[in-house]
Image (cartoon, helix red, strand yellow):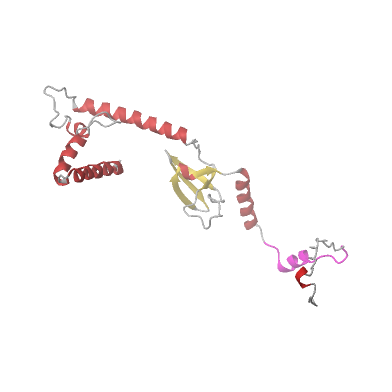
Amino acid sequence: MVERLVRTVKKSIRSALASGTSWKHELPEFLLAYRNTPHASTGVSPAQLLLGRPLRDKLTVAGKDNLPPNSATKAALDRDAGRKSYNKSYADKTRHAKSRTVTEGDHVLVRRDKRPSSFAPRYDPQPYEVTTIKGTTVSAQRDGKTITRNISWFTPAPTDAASTTLSTQSDVDRPSTSGSQAAESTESDPREPVHTLNLPVRPTRERKMPKGLQDFVVKFK
């Protein structure tokens, strides 16, 4: 990673300054050693992958066997793929990761880029319908709008969410009642008994005169 390389370069510069030498003179020596050191994932130095041979430095051994460029590159790629696979399995195990399976036609919820408030749900409650899947890239559609995200942005929608969306669309297509009909439906029948709620009443606090004021005449309002 680039961040790891920058960290190592800064460490070498600090070592040069601590020893009292010029870091501009020590930096080429450090880069030569860094590029000639085998990588932990590939097992081959970066210079050997690029040039097909190790760089000539003070530790070069005469008669050292050099692998052909093609075989060295293939072996390095195989080791790198194996190392990445191990790192992925280890990270998934420690983080308890679960694979998500999405097929075309499924109703899914999409994770929001930015929630309107801290109390808002992380996923959009209105589901999308999956249209196309290409590897880990998923395209979903809702109300004529198509979005494309990574599969990690989607989660299966509950069955009640999909049914709610269908019922909402049917309510929109259904003609609304007139104003008179709505008023008639809201008016209550005078013949029906009116039920009242008996809410509990909080007890009043008993007020007592302090002992220090018993010798005085005090009137409470």
Residue 127 in picture, x, y percent from top left: 55, 48
Q: What stretch is highlighted in magenta?
A: 176-192
The one nearer the camera, 6 or 210, is 210
| Nearer-the-camera pick, 71 or 174 | 71
Question: Is 27 situated above or below 175?
Answer: above
Q: Does the magenta stretch include residue 185?
A: yes
What residue do we see at 15% from left, 39% from top? Answer: 29
Where does the C terminus fall, quadrant-wise?
bottom right
Q: Considering the image in quadrants, where does the N terminus appear?
A: top left
Q: Is residue 59 left or right of residue 146?
A: left
Magenta segment: does it hold 127?
no
* Res. 57 image quadrant: top left
Residue 32 lies in quadrant = top left
Question: Looking at the image, which residue is at 19% across and 33% down?
Answer: 36
Q: Residue furthest front?
A: 215
Q: Image check: 70 left or right of 159?
A: left
- Residue 112 location in percent, x, y? 49, 51
On the image, the x and y values in percent for residue 167 come to: 64, 51
